[in-house]
Amino acid sequence: MKQIQLECTVFEGENSVYLFGADDPDTPVTLVDAGVAVEEVRDQLQSALASENLSFADIETVFLTHFHGDHSGLAGFIQEKSDATIYAHHADADLIERDVDAWESLFEAQKTKLNEWGMPVDKQEELIPFLEGVETMSDGAPTVTRFEAGARFEVGDLTFETVHMPGHTDGQCGFVVDRGEGNELLSGDALLPKYTPNVGGADVRVDKPLQKYLDTLMDIVAADYTVAWPGHRQRIDDPAGRAKYIIDHHRERTEKVLNVLRNHGPADAWTVSAHLFGDLHSIHILHGPGEAYAHLSHLEADGVVENTEDGYVILDSEPVLDELFPAVELA
């Protein structure tokens, strides 16, 4: 397996895509994720393939971790050049195929959330053109072969086992591969080495986004993978430890959300976000209040807060947050 670093023109950190079969004639040439559909990234990927005496036409299979353009953007271009089979979880497949109804439904859900979160009109006007341009991060409309969680694919002598890891998106998946040293996880954006993946704003289709993401993190802890290969930056040598850290991070952020309500409430998600993250621009206009919403709705589900016409209000002034989060011990 070769890790290929590609520029990411929108989000923080280089994208990582993974190439299999470059040095094994018995393994079909396979990519995990595909990068943003802009010329400079396409050229970078082409150069990386050429260094292995390969071209786009040699790619037989592409596994996509989720629908975001920085991961799926070049899938259509690759399929056009090679007739590669593109695999993705069914929950994200329509968006990857650029289905008009699926994208329109997502846009409408986003606009609804922006109003529910209390986002000011000027910030909506700044954000919406960006959201409408997100679809153009994909080049072409690939035909996607859908899979369900737990599907297994034989790639030469390797087996790719799919693991559904929702939270960041509804169809976010990882791929588990044993190359001889135990189970390795190709984690996409479910587990990142530096930033914590956005939940709440990154895919507004996800119901109870924080709870689903916490479940995903606990599944990573339980699986005890030997290493994780993320969708951005470098390998994670202690996936379980990183997952525990992110769980603890979200517990601390929930305490900060409660402190905003204690000091400034009632407050909507936009107001909470402003206290947590300050002034926001570009995609962060969506991600900031989305993150606040994920934590507020997590508290609401447990009866700690209530969403009223005036904003979220505290019902339980001294909740036991340990009951809302998995118990983990940090190293």
Image (cartoon, rainbow, N blue to C red):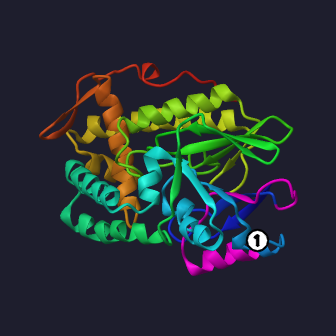
- Classify the position of the N terminus by image quarter: bottom right
Find residue 71 and report its horizontal and vertical position in percent.
56, 60
Is 316 in front, or is 170?
170
- Which picture quadrant has residue 152? top right
- Which picture quadrant has residue 284? bottom left
Task: Using the image, determine if residue 318 lies above or below residue 19.
Answer: above
- Which picture quadrant has residue 232? bottom right
Q: Residues within 10 Å of mark 1 (few under 14, many from 20)?
A: some
Marker count (numbered):
1
Find residue 298 and report its horizontal and vertical position in percent.
35, 32
Residue farthest along the left direction in this orientation? 309
Residue positioned 41% across, 35% down in the render: 254
Residue positioned 42% across, 57% down in the render: 95
Find residue 123 and report its horizontal and vertical position in percent.
26, 65
Residue positioned 65% across, 25% down in the render: 222
Is 150 in front, or is 70?
150
The stretch of residues the image draws in magenta is 22-48
Find residue 186 and report its horizontal and vertical position in percent.
67, 46
Q: Is residue 45 left or right of residue 140?
A: right
Task: Using the image, determine if residue 80 lies above or below residue 309.
Answer: below
Q: Is residue 298 left or right of residue 34?
A: left
Residue 31 colored in magenta in the image: yes
What residue sits right under mark 1 in the picture? 49
Kind of element beneath mark 1? helix
What amino acid does circle 1 point to?
Leu
Residue 206 colored in magenta in the image: no
- Classify the position of the C terminus by image quarter: top right
